[in-house]
């Protein structure tokens, strides 16, 4: 009797749940969804913001339909054209033979200047891409993966290779994680960034081997120092061709000895090591946890993470399946997770520029401001990526954030002189300078 | 001459007696300098970012190998400012010779760590966190220290960062770091953060959570600091000492102004960038070392004038030194060990550690002779008087021998 009663109660509850999720999005939910999967909703109605059209599209949908629509849209991404040098071979280092000291210095100076002007152009390109993209989730995923599979302009010293890595990240951002990991291990910028260039038979460099486990797949505590050494040997000989900038495996530098890696013994090469890594359950938990921290809250719920990680594994590592499960989860929609994560500088700046439909501020300038606030695009501070959450805020950056908010509002007021009153601008200013605006 | 067994025994006895006296007085000396931790003393940390070429800063001018390895870059024997029979200072650092002669300037030679990493980012992270090259830590060593031994409550901050806003050794969850370029700029910008009690305006719903209360906390620190700085700007007398008109000179002048105005802060961090000299090294490094030395010389005079020199120490560090042999473009590539400069009223001037042997290199790089954590150990135990071994070993992730660089003020 009690059992029957319980069963009836459960089915009523289920019915209610289905009905609830079948409701069209409330404006709070719509705002939340676009803030977390993009750069927010339009702050003022100007008619030409890309987010305005997105809002129109999502408004009649329920939660799961809206998530599906956003993910669908991101999978077919839009793109601003790269600077034209990206298609050409990397800038060759200057030939210094037979030059006088003064000539050498001049040649090196010209080379460095060209590199740094390309680096700035690439950073501005990314900023523009985030500002004008019609697929904001794709941009948030790209930002996430650049912060996960870190490389930096400063270390790689090749804007061309960094741009090519960006293309790779864009291709796999919502694709298959197995293919993604194999591709990133052979990505020339990554090979330079994590010193695989000096990883040779008999003289191993363990940098990539360690980071591929510690930061890319397993997290600390799931491998031993012997695993690091074995993996380093497996990746020996993976190089970058300095002329074309393409990946190549150099046989004579490869250590073909028998290695034992995570309990398995064989003549493993780099691909084998990656396949063995992907057999570990921890990979799905590690990636799900990290995506949770970016999209849901700084405090992942282990049970929910395990559930979503299982979806990720059974999909054969489809990032898209993971993201749908994450964005459909009750925790994502819970009001208690509102205003939990500090916006990164890029998220703050792009959110204001898109939300206020500001067009008069150069993307290069915004990229420079983002760098001053701690988020230099294509240049994370360390292999662990940019700061996260409250680490973004110091007395210095908080003051700078307030300053740039004021500057952007001034541009907005100038551009939209006819539509907004000074009273409205003052109200916006108070809203943006409140600490809550730093959160999402 | 043959020695009789008796005289040998006597010699041994005398030696043992001397040893006993020596160690007893050493213990006494240590006790008198121990006392309680004194975090009212201010450490000025100067990061020489990019990898400073130590061999061209403290030059082994008597070693022919140095001249053989550096046909175009070597500093000539006639130009160096001799520190002893083997080592001399780069002439660009002439301004520091007053403090050297006053025995307030020390160089710790051959400083590095095992399995050196040649990546700028990785290596400075190692120095910042007092970790080995096999560990990735995030909390800075000063932040670790202050979470174990709280610095005295200050209305301004636990530490001040002047110029580049990279907390580095000061990075940690509970650190109250004040980043500032100029007093005026800070006060002007801080006006944007509103007045105390304005928190709730703006009509945004207040949610009680960690991130929000953290930001409100920083906002309130900014307001308090701005109020203090405003007072300093209007009340504090101008420094009599003039500083060189360089960026680093102005930054050290700001540090001197704050200390001169009576600000109590255990650490001030500054950065001098540009030492990554892969090509055309000499003019670049000379300019930077000159900028550093001129500013430090003024800083010393200003601190003496303000009566703060005995409670102040300057320490420089860099992520690594550079390769011994010069490269093909009159520069040097990333290397390993290098000297650290230590200067202050409590510093026992001179040379510490051991200059690395140029005939015994590891793939073209110097073998370090002093672990950098020994210098951190000396700063904590002698300069700040922190003697709790648990605190010291938790900060340094292990124990390191002390270098007797500091003596208590008279």
Image (spheres, coloured by chain):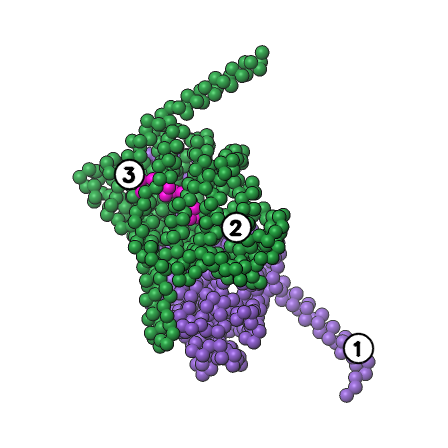
Q: Chain coloured purple: which letter?
A: B
Mark seen at residue A50: 3
The stretch in magenta equals A133-147
Q: Secondary structure at mark 1?
A: helix
Q: In the picture, which quadrant includes the C terminus of chain A?
A: top left
Q: Chain coloured green: which letter?
A: A
In this rendering, is residue B173 above or below A301?
below
Question: Which residue shows up at 62% across the image and 66% down it?
Answer: B29
Q: Chain of mark 1?
A: B
Residue to which mark 2 is pinned: A271
The residues bearing labels 2 and 1 have C-alpha atoms spaced at a distance of 71 Å
Question: Which residue shows up at 53% across the image and 55% down it?
Answer: A235
Q: Nearer the viewer, residue B31 or B278?
A: B278
Question: Which residue shows up at 26% across the image and 41% down it?
Answer: A357
Residue to which mark 1 is pinned: B9
The image position of residue A254, as x and y in percent, is 54, 59
The image position of residue B107, as x and y in percent, is 51, 71
Q: Secondary structure at mark 3?
A: helix
Of circles 2 and 1, the one toward us is: 2
Of circles 2 and 3, the one toward us is: 2
Q: Nearer the viewer, residue B405 or B24?
A: B405
């Amino acid at each position: 009797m009690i059992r029957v009663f319980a069963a009836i109660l459960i089915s009523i509850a289920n019915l209610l749940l289905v009905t609830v999720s079948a409701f069209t999005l409330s404006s709070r939910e719509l705002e939340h969804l676009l803030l977390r999967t993009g750069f927010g909703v339009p702050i003022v109605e100007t008619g030409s913001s890309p987010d305005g059209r997105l809002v129109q599209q999502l408004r009649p949908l329920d939660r799961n339909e809206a998530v599906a629509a956003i993910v669908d849209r991101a999978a077919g991404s839009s793109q601003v054209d790269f600077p034209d040098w990206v298609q050409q071979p990397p800038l060759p280092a200057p030939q210094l033979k037979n030059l006088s000291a003064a000539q050498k210095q001049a040649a090196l100076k010209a080379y460095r200047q060209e590199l740094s002007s390309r680096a700035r152009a690439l950073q501005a390109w990314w900023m523009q891409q985030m500002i004008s993209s019609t697929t904001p989730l794709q941009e948030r995923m790209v930002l996430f993966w650049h912060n996960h599979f870190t490389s930096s302009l400063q270390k790689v010293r090749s804007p061309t290779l960094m741009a090519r890595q960006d293309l790779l990240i864009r291709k796999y951002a919502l694709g298959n994680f197995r293919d993604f990991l194999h591709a990133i291990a052979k990505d020339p910028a990554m090979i330079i960034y994590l010193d695989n260039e000096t990883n040779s038979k008999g003289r191993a460099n363990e940098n990539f081997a360690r980071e591929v486990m510690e930061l890319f797949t397993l997290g600390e505590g799931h491998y031993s120092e012997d695993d690091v050494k074995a993996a380093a040997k497996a990746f020996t000989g993976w190089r970058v061709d300095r002329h074309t900038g393409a990946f190549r495996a150099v046989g004579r530098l490869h250590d073909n000895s028998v290695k034992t890696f995570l309990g398995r013994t064989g003549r493993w090469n780099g691909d084998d090591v990656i396949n063995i890594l992907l057999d570990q359950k921890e990979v799905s938990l590690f990636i799900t946890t990290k995506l949770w921290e970016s999209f849901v809250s700084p405090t992942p719920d282990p049970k929910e993470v395990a559930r979503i990680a299982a979806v990720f594994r059974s999909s054969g590592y489809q990032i898209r399946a993971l993201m749908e499960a994450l964005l459909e989860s009750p925790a994502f929609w819970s009001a208690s997770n509102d205003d939990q994560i500090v916006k990164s500088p890029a998220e703050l700046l792009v959110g204001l520029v898109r939300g206020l439909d500001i067009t008069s501020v150069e993307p290069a300038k915004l990229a420079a401001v983002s760098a001053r606030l701690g988020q230099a695009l294509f240049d994370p501070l360390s292999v662990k990526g940019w700061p996260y959450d409250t680490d973004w805020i110091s007395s210095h950056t908080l003051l700078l954030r307030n300053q740039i908010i004021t500057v952007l509002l001034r541009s907005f007021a100038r551009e939209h002189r006819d539509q907004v009153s000074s009273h409205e601008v003052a109200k916006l200013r108070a809203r943006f300078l409140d600490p809550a605006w730093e959160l999402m | 001459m043959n020695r009789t067994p008796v005289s040998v025994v006597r010699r041994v006895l005398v030696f043992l007696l001397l040893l006993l006296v020596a160690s007893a007085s050493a213990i006494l000396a240590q006790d008198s300098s121990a006392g309680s931790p004194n975090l009212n003393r201010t450490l000025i940390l100067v990061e020489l970012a990019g990898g400073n070429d130590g061999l061209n800063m403290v030059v082994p001018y008597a070693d022919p190998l140095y001249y053989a390895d550096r046909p175009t870059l070597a500093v000539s024997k006639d130009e160096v400012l001799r520190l002893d029979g083997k080592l001399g200072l780069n002439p660009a650092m002439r301004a520091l010779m007053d403090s050297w002669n006053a025995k307030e300037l020390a160089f710790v030679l051959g400083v590095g760590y095992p399995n050196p990493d040649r990546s700028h980012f990785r290596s400075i992270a190692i120095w910042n966190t007092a970790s080995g090259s096999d560990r990735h830590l995030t909390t800075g060593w000063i932040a670790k220290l202050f979470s174990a031994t709280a610095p005295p409550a200050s209305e301004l901050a636990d530490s001040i960062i002047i110029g580049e806003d990279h907390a580095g050794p000061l990075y940690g969850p509970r650190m109250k770091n004040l980043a500032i370029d100029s007093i005026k700029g800070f006060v002007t910008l801080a006006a944007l953060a509103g007045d105390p009690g304005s928190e709730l305006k703006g009509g945004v719903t207040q949610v009680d959570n960690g991130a929000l209360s953290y930001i409100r906390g920083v906002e309130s620190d900014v307001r308090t600091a701005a109020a203090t700085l405003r007072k300093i700007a209007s009340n504090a007398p101008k420094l009599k000492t003039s500083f060189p008109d360089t960026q680093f000179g102005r930054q050290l002048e700001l540090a001197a102004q704050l200390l001169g105005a009576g600000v109590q802060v255990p650490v001030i961090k500054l950065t001098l960038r540009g030492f990554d000299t892969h090509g055309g090294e000499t003019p670049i490094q000379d300019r930077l070392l000159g900028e550093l030395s001129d500013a430090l010389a003024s800083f010393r005079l200003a601190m003496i004038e303000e009566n703060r020199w005995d409670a102040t120490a300057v320490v420089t560090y860099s992520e690594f030194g550079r390769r011994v042999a010069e490269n093909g473009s009159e520069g040097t590539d990333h290397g390993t060990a290098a000297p650290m400069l230590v200067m202050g009223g409590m510093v026992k001037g001179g040379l510490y550690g051991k200059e690395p042997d140029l005939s015994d290199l590891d793939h073209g790089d110097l073998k370090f002779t002093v672990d950098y954590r020994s210098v951190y150990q000396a700063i904590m135990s002698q300069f700040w008087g922190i003697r709790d071994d648990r605190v010291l070993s938790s900060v340094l992730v292990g124990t390191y021998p002390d270098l007797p660089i500091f003596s208590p003020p008279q």
